[in-house]
Image (spheres, helix red, strand yellow):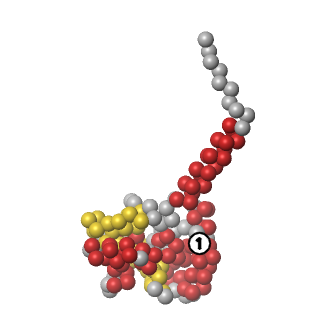
Amino acid sequence: MTLLLRPHPGWLAVLCLCLGAMMSVARADAPVFRADHGKAVAGYDVVTYFTSEKPLPGNPSHAVMWKGVIWQFTSRRNRETFEANPRAYAPQYGGYCAFGVSQGLVLNTDPMLYRIIDGKLYLLHDKAVWKRWVEDMSGYIAEADTNWPAVLRDE
């Protein structure tokens, strides 16, 4: 004897609504920060951009997960400083190239090519991009602010 189940006429609509809701939640929760092998800013301690002469590589023993990526720090103190206010130290535009975002592009960055402007960390792709970006940083930042985070949808 074969048992046939007849679905309710509205089951397909309910299923589509549920799947659509799950997809939009997944998009909303997708990491916004660029990661190299799961690490933000290639494992550099973002607090050191603000407190040292140059950025320093972080240590996996002083790491924290934030916004879907691992942030590494040189010390427990730097990790705690970051945890107290991560947005103050995290790079702008998810760690993607500030110039690239201004042009509607998502480019990787070199953690040694950076600038802090008005207390915000901006990372750049390479030396050629750097030369162009420094010609009109405030203009490119304004354009990048307009493009962010919509530029991620085109990635």
Drawn side of residue 118 relative to residue 53, left or right: right
Tell me where residue 96 appears, x and y as whole percent: 50, 70
Residue wearing tag 1: 148
Could you tell me which quadrant the N terminus lies in?
Answer: top right
Of residues 104 and 31, which is closer to you in this image?
31
- Residue 37 position, x and y percent, is 39, 59
Percent position (x, y) of residue 16?
66, 44
The residue tagged with tag 1: helix, strand or loop? Answer: loop
Residue ID at (62%, 46%)? 18
Name the side, left or right, on which 63 lies relative to 92: left
Q: Quadrant of residue 71?
A: bottom left
| Residue 50 pos. (x, y %) | 37, 83
Q: Label 1 crowding class (10 Å Cα cut-off): few <14, some 14-19, many 20+? A: some
Tell me: residue 26, above or below residue 57.
Answer: above
Please tell me which residue lies in front, 14 or 103.
14
- Image vertical order of residue 62 relative to residue 18, above or below: below
Tell me which corner region of the image, top left, top right, bottom left or bottom right, holds residue 9: top right
2 lies left or right of 111 = right
Can you say which quadrant of the picture contains the C terminus? bottom right
Q: Residue furthest right?
A: 9
Residue at figure coordinates x 72%, y 38% from the top left: 10
Name the residue rendered at 52%, 73% in the picture.
Answer: 93
